[in-house]
Image: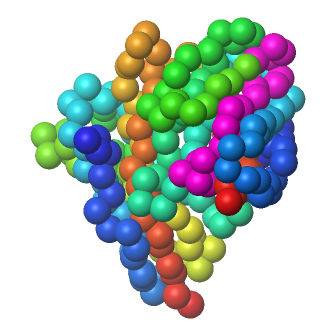
Amino acid sequence: DQQVKQNSPSLSVQEGRISILNCDYTNSMFDYFLWYKKYPAEGPTFLISISSIKDKNEDGRFTVFLNKSAKHLSLHIVPSQPGDSAVYFCAASVEQGGSEKLVFGKGTKLTVNP
Amino acid sequence: DAGITQSPRHKVTETGTPVTLRCHQTENHRYMYWYRQDPGHGLRLIHYSYGVKDTDKGEVSDGYSVSRSKTEDFLLTLESATSSQTSVYFCAISNRRTNEKLFFGSGTQLSVL
């Protein structure tokens, strides 16, 4: 029962173009969404987040869009750079057992080609 | 890595042996978590802690136990390691009840042969 789905295991784009990473979720109780970035042999690092009361959040080259009716969020990276090559995890926050926990997707490996 | 140290970074062990992984933080954050990362599964929560001697189970807690005797240390123990526990283990910390913006350690690569 996968509540957060990243259906594309990998994505390859050219430097300077837009990267769009997608994430779908099934639990309508999720109230906060995050993207984490992970380089090999390192721990994930927080990238950007969005509250369920918003539909867009922007931070420099990174923008996250949330479509609640479709239970879909996406991460846009413009322009893409080779240093953006990493695995990107989508995560959603849900209250469970009196506390809020993060549910992660399986990740999408982004490769940005020079 | 926001003052988080995981040890060891790599470990190879045999099936049936006990294994303890350590997470040490210097941020004085109240909340600590253990995740495992496996291909095709993403990150899955094993156990977490709200504070000293206050822990609870995550979604994949079977075969694991934890202890937190000090704010800065969170130990994950595999009582009797199995090959299915071969994974990369990440510790994470947060200073809020809601665990947005977790800060992760660099991970421990565990191989159970």
Q: Looking at the image, which is closer to me, B29 or B88?
A: B88
* Residue A59: percent from left, percent from top: 51, 51
x 44%, y 31%: residue: B59
Is residue B67 visible in the rendered structure shown here? yes
Relative placement, left or right, of B40 versus B17 is left
- Where on the picture, by quarter, is residue A3? top left
x 83%, y 23%: residue: B72
Residue farthest to the front, as pictured:
B16
Relative placement, left or right, of B73 versus A55 is right
Identify whether A41 is placed above or below A89: below
* Residue A86: percent from left, percent from top: 56, 68
Q: Looking at the image, which is closer to me, A16 or A96?
A: A96
Q: In which quarter of the image is the C terminus of chain B?
A: bottom right
* Residue A84: percent from left, percent from top: 57, 70
x 50%, y 47%: residue: B43
Question: Which residues fall within the magenta stretch?
Answer: B68-91
Reply yes or no: does residue B90 show up in magenta: yes
Reply yes or no: does residue A43 show up in magenta: no
x 42%, y 65%: residue: A108
Identify whether B79 is placed above or below B87: above
Q: Looking at the image, which is closer to me, A68 or B36?
A: B36
* Residue A13: percent from left, percent from top: 42, 82
Is residue B100 visible in the rendered structure shown here? no
